[in-house]
Amino acid sequence: MLSVSEARERILQGLRPTAPEVVSLVCGSGRVTALPVMARLDNPPADVSSMDGYAVRAADLSATGVKLRLIGESPAGHPFDGTVGAGECVRIYTGSIVPDGADAIVIQENATQHDDIVTTSQTATAGLYVRRKGQDFARGHEIIPAGRRLDARGIGVAAAANHPWVTVHRRPRVGIVATGDELCLPGDPIGPGMIANSNTLMLATLVRAAGAEPVMMPVARDRMEDLLALSHMLDGLDMLVTIGGASVGRYDLVQEGLKRIGMEPDFWKIAMRPGKPLMHGRLNGMPLIGVPGNPVAAFVCGTLFVVPALQRLAGEQDVGPDVDVAILGEDVAANDQRESYLRARLRRDSAGMLTALPFSRQDSAMLHLLTESQALIIRDPLAPPARKGDMCRIIRLDIR
C-alpha cells in the first residue's frame, strides 16, 4: 500500500490549472490569480499626513514654543493649493495631502491655536508623521503574485491599486457521484437497509470551500449500467470524485465499471486509517479520485487528497493540507503500519498553549464525532505510544 504522502504526490502530478478568465473584482474572492496584479498607481498618491495636526516646515521647528501663522487647511479630498513658506503652517488631517513647502506634521496635541496663530510645543524633523508617496506600493509594482488565492486582504489591495477586474483561473468543475443501492435523498422516507446520502453534500461543501464548483450527479446504483452511463455525464468536468463501491465486495462495481468507460487506474489502497480504499486514476485524461463510502473516511480523504488536487487545478502552487503542532491532551496507544488520523477537540491550556484531546472512540462510522472535532491528530505508521504533554502534529478543521 502507498503512503499518504506518496499517494498525494501521485495525485498532484500532472495536474494543470484551469484556463484563465477575467472577472469583476467584486466576484474575485476565493479565486486564484492567473496573472500578477500590478499597481496602476502610487499608494499613497502623494505625500500625506498620518495624523491630525499642522503641516509645517521642519526648519522652522528647531525649538519648542515657535509661533506660526495659519494660512489655510488641507482636508481629505481637498488639498491646499498654496505653498507653505517660512513661519507658516496649514491645518491638516489624517490622509490629507501635505502642501508644497511643508515637510513635517505637528500633531494637534502638541500645538495650540488662537485665531490664525499656532504655537507649537515640539520640535520636528523632515518626514515626521508624513507617509511618503508610493510608501505602500508604487505604480507598476507587483502587489499580488500569480497563483495567490484572493481573500479580503487581496481584494482590498487590488481595489486600492485601482483594479476593477482581475484575471483568475476558472473554477474547476467537479462531478461527485455516490454509489450504492442503500442511498436515498436526505428527507426522503428511509426504508429497511437504507441510509441518507450524506457524503455527496458533505463533499460538495468541501469542494465549494476549496474554490471549485461541485456538480452533484445521480446516485449510481449497484448496477453496471449505472456506471457505464457516467460516460455521458462527463462533458465540462475537470475532475470526477466517486464515493464508495471501490472495494472488492460482490457489489463493489466501481473499478470495473470505470475501466469499461476508459479509466486508467493509478493506484488503489493506501496505508492510512480511515480511508484505506482510496482510488486514483485518469478517466479519458480527466483526474479521478474514488473515496471510501464510510462518511468519516470520505471526509478525511476529501481533506487530504481531493482539496489539494482542487487547489492545484485552481492555480495554487502551495497546496494543503497545512500541518500545525499542538500538545497532546491524552495518552494515545502505539500505532500499526497505517498512518492514522484521530478526531480531536482543540483547547487552550492555562498557559495559552493549543492542546489536542483525541476522542476515546475513533469508530470511522461515527460522523457526529467529526462535527465535534476541531482537528485531526496525525499518527505516523508504527508510532510508539504517546503521552499526555507530548507534542503532536495536527490538521485543523476549524480553519476554513
Image (cartoon, helix red, strand yellow):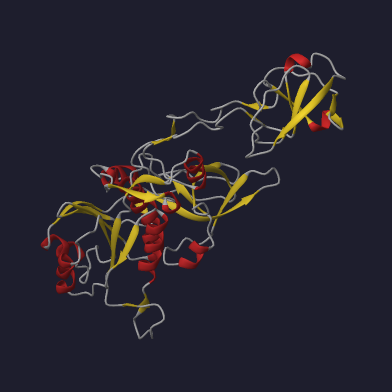
Residue in the picture at 15% in, 63% down: 256
- Horizontal side of 195 relative to 392 (left or right) equals left
Residue in the picture at 49% in, 28% down: 138
Residue in the picture at 39% in, 58% down: 208
> 201 or 152: which is nearer to us?
152
Up the image or down, 4 lies above or below 240; here it is above
Up the image or down, 44 lies above or below 159; here it is above
Q: Is residue 51 visible?
A: yes
Q: Is residue 334 visible?
A: no
Residue 195 rendering spot, x and y as whole percentages: 37, 77
Residue 116 rendering spot, x and y as whole percentages: 84, 30
Q: Quadrant of residue 364?
A: bottom left
Q: Quadrant of residue 252?
A: bottom left
Residue in the picture at 62% in, 40% down: 77
Residue 133 rendering spot, x and y as whole percentages: 56, 27
- Horizontal side of 28 relative to 269 (left or right) equals right
Q: Quadrant of residue 201?
A: bottom left
Residue 226 rendering spot, x and y as whole percentages: 18, 73
Count of labels shown? 0
Up the image or down, 202 lies above or below 210; here it is below
> 276 or 59: which is nearer to us?
59
> 33 or 316: which is nearer to us?
33
- Horizontal side of 362 relative to 263 (left or right) equals right
